[in-house]
Amino acid sequence: MDTLTSSIGAALSEQVFERNGTRVLVLSPNEAASVETCLAQVQARVAQAKPNYGGVLLRGFDALGAAGFDRLVNRFGQPLLTYEFGSTPRSKIEKGVYSSTEYPADQWIDQHNEQSYTLNWPAVIWFYCDIAAEQGGATPVADSRLVYERLDRALRRHFADKQVMYVRNYGNGLDLPWEQVFGTDERDKVEQYCRANRIDYEWLDDGEALRTRQVCQSELRHPVTGETVWFNQAHLFHVSNLPPAIREALLEVVDDDRLPRNTFFGDGTPIDAAMLDEIRAVYRDTMLSFAWQAADTLILDNLLMSHGRAPFAGKRRVLVAMTA
């Protein structure tokens, strides 16, 4: 990882973290300070830098805590979003603040743009490091513009023509229950949400289980920069993303069509695993990783930058918020 340091005024200094084209701008106070004391300058620089870099890291400011993180995000003026139709376990901390994905510490979470498996996604995703892990636990990022450019053109065209279908099964004890995903235990409210969001649904096992299908985009054009970005989670939801031992164990318990999640092309045809391997390889080659420091705040344009999670040891607490 390369860094470049400079000063932008009496209150702030900046540096750039960079690897293979993915860049994050780092803003730090020149002396001990809270973000509040120079908020106007921070807001202006974040607004200016985000379309260029895709991500801005606030480092070296006073600790915020969960409530302070919530206030900071609100001060930027965009409404906080709830985690509707989520795909990973999280805990709600404040009204619009959640824990980061609560997967086992020894597991990697591959690169993805938040909720790119839906037709409704946050414009910005915020992370706050309350407790940095003793070892590992980074939130690696990758520039979605570069990912798109580095993928084979024929692969991109194939995905753009067919799009991506996400198939999810809830209620089999192998993934999140539908009550948690939809935030209700009333079937009619689930159906209403699905109809409003163009999600096909099917109740199974006398209503105890639910299957949904939704066809979504593979790429997007950024509304501000006009650049095309790779924007889907085909590689993450696909059964090939599971470790072989887990995949084999699952298929001993359930049939293919009852897997907790899987992806297909939008017409229902299978996605060649070699295509998904290429996507994962491009993400790896484009990914930038840096260690968290306690009180760091990372602000990502959710279209321009993907994120993931590295395995870790020791206690780790990273909070997440999403804004429109």
Image (tube, rainbow, N blue to C red):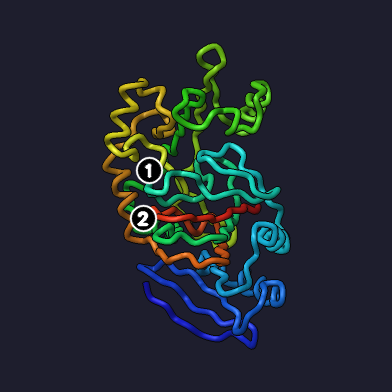
Q: Would residue 142 be found to the left or right of residue 94 on screen?
A: left
* Residue 141 is at least partly visible in this image: no
Q: Residue furthest top?
A: 206
Tag 1, which secondary structure?
helix
Across and down, in percent, residue 250 comes to 34, 27
Residue drawn at x 47%, y 29% is 168
In-front residue for pair 97/150? 97
In-front residue for pair 317/303? 317
* Residue 269 is at least partly visible in this image: yes
Query: Pointer 1: what residue?
Result: 235
Tag 2, which secondary structure?
helix
Circle on res. 227: none
Which image quarter: residue 233?
Answer: top left
**Marks 1 and 2 in Cβ contact (< 8 Å):** yes
Report the number of discs. Answer: 2
Measure how far apart labels 1 and 2 are at the Cα level. Answer: 10 Å
Which image quarter: residue 288?
Answer: bottom left
Query: Pointer 2: what residue?
Result: 283
The residue type indicated by label 2 comes to Tyr
Across and down, in percent, residue 185 comes to 65, 25
Residue drawn at x 42%, y 66% is 290
Which image quarter: residue 235?
Answer: top left
In-front residue for pair 243/134? 134
In-front residue for pair 324/14? 14
Across and down, in percent, residue 145 comes to 44, 59
